[in-house]
Image: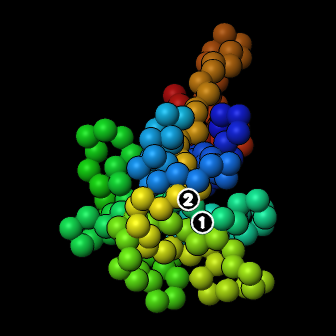
Amino acid sequence: MCDNGWITGLHNSCYSFDTNRAVTWQQAQGLCMDMGGHLATLDTLDEMYWMKGFRGYHSTLHGEAWISGRRMNGVWKWVADKPGAQPTKISHFDWSKNQPYKCGDCVQRFGRSKEKFSEAWLNFDDMECDAARYNICKKKCAVIHFNLLTNNKRSPYRLFTQDQFIGFTT
């Protein structure tokens, strides 16, 4: 279950799209952490395409936005989502044409261009980390635990999120 103002996405993740204030990459990471999350990592291709489709459908989300990617020692990585965790190498890229252009060490998702469709629309772009952009935060959905008593026995159906059944317990 996602908190108020967060969108339920794939893989039990919640997303927040802040389009009210443009901030640096570091400030964006701090804002996400203040809300219990981190700048969005797009770990799988289906998550990458879900994000592109969701942003493309909602016209208020078409601005350039920071995600968690950052160049470290020449390698693009998702920055650790919790203190002490190690950054992980980005395995799936969705770079815009001619990107990365080596103009920055942080990853943004391009916004929608003036043309109806563009090769760059909502793809990855490297950018100077001190540029002001919107941000996309991510965190895990809260899991609701409850016990359902049936004839004085515990039901095996007890781990649910808002929209999906997660599993059985015994």
Q: Which mark sits nearer the N-terminus, 2 or 1?
A: 1
Name which residue lies at 48% across and 79% down. 95
| Residue labelled with disc 2 | 133
Name which residue lies at 31% across and 59% down. 88
Mark 2–mark 1 contact, CB under 8 Å? Answer: yes
Quadrant where the N terminus is found in the figure: top right
Can you tell which quarter of the image residue 93 is in? bottom left
| Residue labelled with disc 1 | 64
Name which residue lies at 70% across and 66% down. 62
- In depth, the one of 110 and 54 nearer the eye is 110
Secondary structure, mark 1, is loop
The kind of residue on which mark 2 rests is Arg
Can you tell which quarter of the image residue 166 is in? top right
Name which residue lies at 66% across and 10% down. 152
The spot of residue 121 in percent (x, y) is 64, 78
The spot of residue 168 in percent (x, y) is 57, 36
The kind of residue on which mark 1 rests is Glu
Residue 50 visible in rendering: no
In this picture, is 156 found above or below 106? above
- In depth, the one of 155 and 37 nearer the eye is 37
